[in-house]
Amino acid sequence: MKVLVVGSGGREHAICMAVAKSSQVDKIYCAPGNAGIAEYAELVDIKAMEFDRLVSFAKDNCIDLTIIGMDDPLVGGIVDVFEAEGLRVFGPRKNAAIIEGSKAFSKDLMKKYGIPSAAYENFDDPEKALEYLETANMPIVLKADGLALGKGVLICQTLEEAKEGVKSIMLDKQFGSAGNKMVIEEFMTGREVSVLCFCDGTTIKPMTSAQDHKRAKDGDQGLNTGGMGNFSPSPFYTEEVKKFCEENIYSKTMAAMKAEGRDFTGVLFVGLMLTPDGPKVLEYNARFGDPEAQVVLPRLQNDIIDVINACIDGKLDKIDLKFEDNACVCVILASDGYPLKYEKGFKITGMENFKNVPGRYLFHAGTKFNENGDIVTNGGRVLGVTATGKTLKEARANAYEYVDLVDFKNKYYRHDIGKAIDEA
């Protein structure tokens, strides 16, 4: 079969790698892809939001299955467009992808159906938001309602900081139209855990757990980013926590979306906070996480095509989802200055050290070929150095050893990814 993957980051690289393992797949295309993805897929020069061109390509090339990796096209309704043309596609429809596209919608959904989450209020008027802050407890969390590349969340320690945050999100439009509406949320404390789940509209099957590191600098300092590293599984996601989440969060979310006429088919990302009062939902995403996919998919034992087909056909209950009994750690190599100002276009060396070495992966997030055919940096997050190990400590040690095997000018990374492992 022929498969088209839509997207261009480390997540899509991990998806393409998983798809390439399937004996059912003869050919993979990726639009627009990146230099690393070219190892598995033929790159197609079509952007993720060019729906008509993607549909034409899928038809002209007899694509059997299209997998949507990115949030923007999902929220924009790409699945609806493909389905209207009779094309087989994996991801939630527009009316279900709103669970990520609008934080206000997802908070209201959780409140209506009794899914544990932080207390909150929604605002579309900055003056009313500022008024509300005068009586709120600090610290407090401000969230731009729409998509903001994983950066639209501000944790404010003081009232002055919170007021400045409202100005930045709603008036200065730091995150563009994503800030037309805003959620102000209670600040929760505890361990963060991410759980990706396969869904077929009725059945939901959680994958292995992971834990992200959002802040740019060591010690969880600096600005929020799209993710500076990840590890899987989380030692804090115990069997007891898992059972609670399956009963009170995952199945309830699927039932809630169905009750709203928004059947969710695809991958639901559930961001959890393990609070002193029990697990609560931090956020939902409507696709594989990035870099969660880079630590979860290398551990997947099933043929991903079987799982995806079961989701599309409403037969996920027939799948016995299995993951390797090991651990995986991903350290993001970024361009110094990310997520604000950074230079790109620097040649990357040492990538050959990752060719065909079991348990050693190099996922490309922001790379491209230059005019000489060299692979150069082309983004804030450049590479995901990823390693497996029998234990989390071993996987972490391996990942940091492998970081030195690849290089580019202005390479920057956090030195404490997975440090929480030592406290488990």
Image (cartoon, grey):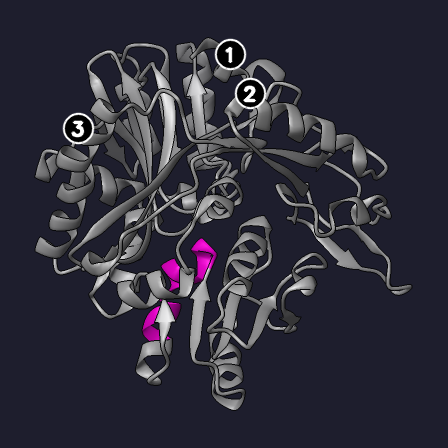
| Residue 417 screen position, x and y as percent | 58, 23
Report the residue at 37% width, 18% height from top.
191
Name the residue tied to disc 1. Answer: 422
Q: Is residue 145 magenta?
A: no
Q: CA distance from mark 3 to mark 1?
A: 25 Å
Do tag 2 and tag 1 residues touch (Cβ < 8 Å)? Answer: yes
Give residue 156's quadrant in the image: top left
Could you say whether the residue bearing mark 2 is in a helix, strand or loop?
A: helix
Report the residue at 64% width, 35% height from top.
332
Residue segment shown in magenta:
69-81
Could you say whether the residue bearing mark 3 is in a helix, strand or loop?
A: helix
Mark toward the start of the polypeptide (3 vs 1): 3
Q: Is residue 308 visible?
A: yes
Q: 153 or 31: nearer the eye?
A: 31
Report the residue at 19% width, 14% height from top.
277
User: Left of 216 or right of it: where is 183?
Assistant: left
Name the residue tied to disc 3. Answer: 244
| Residue 112 screen position, x and y as percent | 9, 39
Q: Amino acid at mark 3?
A: Phe
Label 3, residues with CA under 10 Å away: few <14, some 14-19, many ≥20:
some
Mark toward the start of the polypeptide (2 vs 3): 3
Do tag 3 and tag 1 residues touch (Cβ < 8 Å)? Answer: no
Q: Amino acid at mark 1?
A: Asp
Magenta segment's dominant SS is helix
What is the tally of numbered marks visible in this picture? 3
Name the residue tied to disc 2. Answer: 393
Mark toward the start of the polypeptide (2 vs 1): 2
In front of the other: label 2 or label 3? Answer: 2
Q: CA distance from mark 2 to mark 3?
A: 27 Å
